[in-house]
Amino acid sequence: MYRVNTGLIRQYAQKYSEMNMTATVRIDRPNPATLDTNTGDVTAQVQKTIYEGKGRVSTVSGPVQYSLGEEPQYFSSGTVYIPLIDQDGNPTTPQVNDIVIVTSHPDVLMVNRAFRIMNVNASGQFVSTRELSVTGVQRWEAWTPTNNIPPEWYV
């Protein structure tokens, strides 16, 4: 009977997964939103960046249309993969509601896209990456500089 070296298999799986991470991402954890009583604006300030490095943004499905008020909103969903351990040797610790920002990607239209983490999946015998289920708002051709849409969302 053969003995299987599970430690070696896990290392191989992690190396293979990380070789396929062709994007770079930043994960920010926002503070709770605050209301400015003078202006009526609600803002959420970034509490801290919890990860910055290589990642993989998988197929984004959608868009799914929701009607919120008078304007239809288009949302997409997908998966982002990051290493289990960051470049400093610390475990990565994303949480639900953290924000993933794509800082570089082979597809230039993905750069500066932001996604909200909906779930941090954990399963499998040889877990090789952190798998993050994400959702984000889709671009729309009617967004222009005159209606206060961030430039990275322009078509």
Image: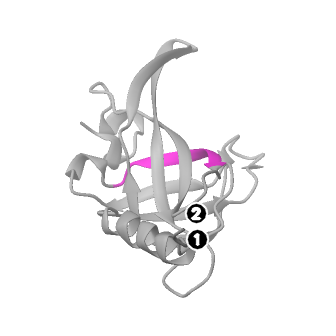
Residue 81: % across, % down: 47, 56
Label 2: few (<14), some (14–19) or many (≥20) C-alpha neighbours in 10 Å: many
Residue 116: % across, % down = 56, 46
- The image quadrant where one finds the C terminus is top left
Q: Nearer the viewer, residue 73 or 38?
A: 73
Picture layout, residue 28 above or below residue 41:
below
Element carrying mark 1: strand
Toward the front, the furthest residue is 1
Magenta part of the chain: 112-120
**Residue 13 located left or right of residue 48:** left
Point 40% across, 25% down: residue: 62
Tag 1: amino acid:
Thr
N-terminal-most mark, 2 or 1? 2
Nearest to the observer: residue 45 or residue 25: 25
Front-lying residue, 60 or 126: 126
Residue 52: % across, % down: 48, 72
Left or right: where 105 falls relative to 54: left
User: Dot 1, crowdedness within 10 Å: few (<14), some or many (≥20)?
Assistant: some
Q: What is the x, y in percent for residue 121?
A: 63, 49
Evaluate whether residue 145 shows in this view: yes
Q: Which mark is residue 49?
A: 1
Q: Which residue is mark 2?
A: 28
Q: Are marks 2 and 1 in contact (CB under 8 Å)?
A: yes
| Residue at position x 52%, y 11% in the image | 70
